[in-house]
Amino acid sequence: MTRIAVIGGGRIGEALISGLLKAGRAARDLVVAESFPARAAELAEQYAIRVTTVADAAEGADVVVIAVKPGDVDPVVAQLAAGDLDGEREQLIVTLAAGLPTWRYENKLPAGVPVVRVMPNTPMLVGEGVSAIAAGRFAKAEHLETVRELLGSVGKVVTVSEAQIDAVTAVSGSGPAYFFLVAEAMVDAGVSLGLTRATASELVVQTMVGSAAMLAESGESATELRAAVTSPGGTTAAAVRELERGGLRTAFYDALTAAKVKSAALGAPTEKAGVSAE
Ligand SMILES: NC(=O)C1=CN([C@@H]2O[C@H](COP(=O)(O)OP(=O)(O)OC[C@H]3O[C@@H](n4cnc5c(N)ncnc54)[C@H](OP(=O)(O)O)[C@@H]3O)[C@@H](O)[C@H]2O)C=CC1
Ligand SMILES: O=C(O)[C@@H]1CCC=N1
């Protein structure tokens, strides 16, 4: 059984841990390193997993998942490099951090340590995540397979080139926030039309769940499904006209472009030392 160390027990770290446990992985095969003491205690209590230091978590793990904020990655990698990681032992580094290219890890780790970059999303908490995975310089097919199996237990997995990960981040990494924002706006609009907040919330949540299920299962495109709701001269056409007038498509184009640009900026070269992986 693969032993997994998760470094950083924040929102995405917890989503992964919780999703893996729900998918049937044994708590004894998971360990987490979390620097915020109250948070560490909370995770230990809620999930009955071992919470320890970075070095101790990495020691003995087959897969080390880095789930700290991009700005906290360098010290974590320095700690891993100071440990006994080595390419021969085939310990695999999996990073979930937005923006940071694999060369930033490879430059600091002993030569040959495989790194796989992943952009997951929080719905993996409920087994409905989607993750894009990209191999670093030393990652082989078997390493990608290990990551595919790991993330596959908490959602879907697609393989991309590392050059595409910033775009993935804009689409699906940040994506859940766009849907939550739309849900929030629809609930508020429903309340302004006289519904109670509870009723508006129930209607919006189930409309999203049902629409998502149709998108996933019907085999029809979003365009076809929307057309089927839009009766000629009817209510939906009136609403869609207002959304288009409000610049919905342009807003999404600009929003996703901003997210991609931000992701690339998070990983802007600081010490590239002649190595380019993108
Ligand atoms: N949230 C999301 O939807 C997604 C996030 N990601 C990526 O995942 C990473 C984590 O994001 P998120 O979970 O939202 O962030 P959080 O801030 O919620 O979680 C990070 C956690 O790591 C802890 N931490 C920081 N340094 C260390 C360390 N040296 N050792 C152990 N623990 C440490 C932090 O503690 P403290 O608060 O004390 O610093 C914090 O609890 C980011 O790089 C982000 O880009 C990727 C996809 C989706
Ligand atoms: O907002 C962020 O930077 C992270 C990466 C993708 C989702 N959350």
Image (cartoon, helix red, strand yellow):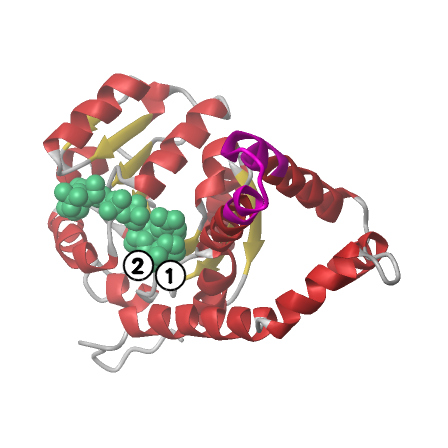
Give SS at disc 1. Answer: loop
**Magenta stretch: dominant secondary structure:** helix
- Residue 267 seen from this side: no
The answer to whether 211 appears left or right of 22 in the picture is right
- What residue range appears in magenta? 188-203
The answer to whether 183 appears left or right of 106 in the picture is right
Mark found first going from the N terminus, 2 or 1? 2
| Residue 60 % position (x, y) | 25, 32
Query: Residue 201 lies in magenta, yes or no?
Result: yes
The residue sitting at the right extreme is 232
Query: Residue 128 lies in magenta, yes or no?
Result: no
The residue sitting at the front extreme is 194
The answer to whether 150 appears left or right of 72 in the picture is right
Say how many tags the image has: 2
| Residue 195 % position (x, y) | 58, 37
Q: Quadrant of the N terminus?
A: top left
| Residue 171 % position (x, y) | 51, 61
Dot label at residue 58: none
- The reply to whether discs 2 and 1 touch (Cβ–Cβ < 8 Å) is yes
| Residue at which label 1 appears | 138
Residue at x 63%, y 36% (from the top left corner)? 203
| Residue at which label 2 appears | 112
| Residue 207 % position (x, y) | 66, 40
Nearest the viewer among 278 and 191 is 191
- The Cα atoms of the two marked residues, 2 and 1, are separated by 6 Å
